[in-house]
Image: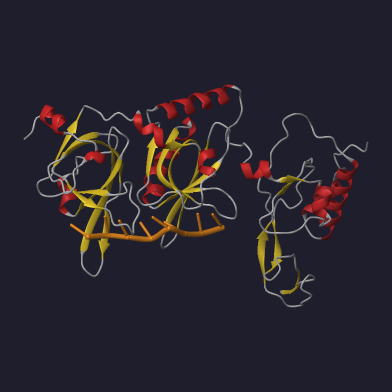
Amino acid sequence: MATESELANQTVPINKIPKNSVDSVIRVLVIRRGSITPYKNSRHEGTYRTIILVDEEGIKIQATLFNKQIETWKDFLKPNKSYYIAKGRYDRVNPNYSSVHKEVELAFTDNTVITETDHEVSTQKFSDGFLSLDAADNLPNGSILDLICVLVSVNPIIQNATSKRREIVVTNELMEPTIVTLWGDFAENDGAFLDKLKDDKPILGLCDVRVSIYKGRFGISTIPVSSVLINPIFQKAIDLRACREIIEANNKDITVAPTKAMRRAIEVPLDHILDGLLPESQDSMYKFKATIVDILNKDEPWYFSCKTCRKKVRVIEEAATCANCNIDNVEYAMRSLIAEEIHQLEDQAPVILEEEVRSVRKYRKRAKKTTNAAAQINQKKPKVAKD
DNA sequence: CCCCCCCC
């Protein structure tokens, strides 16, 4: 068995491993240890576990333990620990699948030796490759990147027969909230762990995650070879933490900042929306300033919508009439009314304009027709000044 | 020897 200094002398960076090497030594930090996963196909059956490693140059490599190897190395390759790995086999990656390294992957053989070391792999250089949310937002859909951000909230896991997912919200210096979807064991394991830490607003390094743009909205998704680093130790993470602390010291709540989509939305008078003066398209976003006077449909925040044109239908004894399509018995569904975001104006209480007073009247008129909540609003005088 | 890149 080699001593630590012998191992250190033989150590090479991942990017300098000779072709077909079987005796190179690497010193790596474990940044991910996946769940033990069963597999079965026409040729083989068993279990595997994916490990993601990074060396001192910040170069990552994926390794897979199969079957008995999982048990053999169960007390090794633990997350956040550093190891020497000797006599591993370096295979070419299958170009059909994503990996953390373009060319090589690590496989374990009967000769492979793994030794834990207290000489920890420094992550200082690892920092260089991490992008901010703003930089990531400029990349095309499907891009794979390393992202540095602040965790602000963790939603519950959503599970169905075939998949598990969980959304978390992250932000950056500019308080730009972005949704990251965690899949599979990222949703389950990393997600549950982040849920416990979320009040501390930890810095996250999300490695090899994917840009996922849906309906024009920028988002991030994990892929099977992603890694989640919590409070990593390198300059970009330290800078972001300092930034977060300044923002918090100014008593700004980083969990409720407007998104970029909100900031980019065209501001219009509320009347223009109510009077249907704006071109309607599914992806267009508009915003307006107004005072919330009351909430009409507190109990039933949805309406019956025509399945063809999505406009509101009139339902009388199960038969729905769509005035827009001009059909008497249309298929319809419940549809929620969603304000994507509501933010309080920072500077001052908004001035009530004559136009907005008219808007209030319009709402009251509409409410009178249908909802129970109309009864509530009609009991009160509107809280709007006349002049 | 694995391998799902998904969802609203």
- Pick whichever, A194 or A121, lies toward us: A121
Q: Position of residue A136 (x, y in %)?
A: 50, 42
Q: How many marks?
A: 0
Q: Is residue A280 above or below residue A239?
A: below
Residue occupying the point 18% across, 55% down: A67
Q: Is residue A38 left or right of residue A215?
A: left
Q: Quadrant of the C terminus of chain A?
A: top right
Q: Position of residue A168 (x, y in %)?
A: 49, 44
Q: Is residue A87 left or right of residue A219?
A: left
Q: Is residue A191 above or below residue A362?
A: above
Colouring mode (rainbow / by chain / secondary structure / one colour): secondary structure
Q: Position of residue A201 (x, y in %)?
A: 48, 32
Residue occupying the point 32% across, 57% down: A95
Residue occupying the point 33% across, 30% down: A123
Q: Is residue A231 above or below residue A327?
A: above
- Pick whichever, A280 or A15, lies toward us: A15
- Pick whichever, A214 or A90, lies toward us: A90
Q: Quadrant of residue A58?
A: top left
Q: Is residue A198 left or right of residue A90?
A: right
Residue, far left: A1
Residue occupying the point 77% across, 29% down: A348
Q: Is residue A71 left or right of residue A184?
A: left
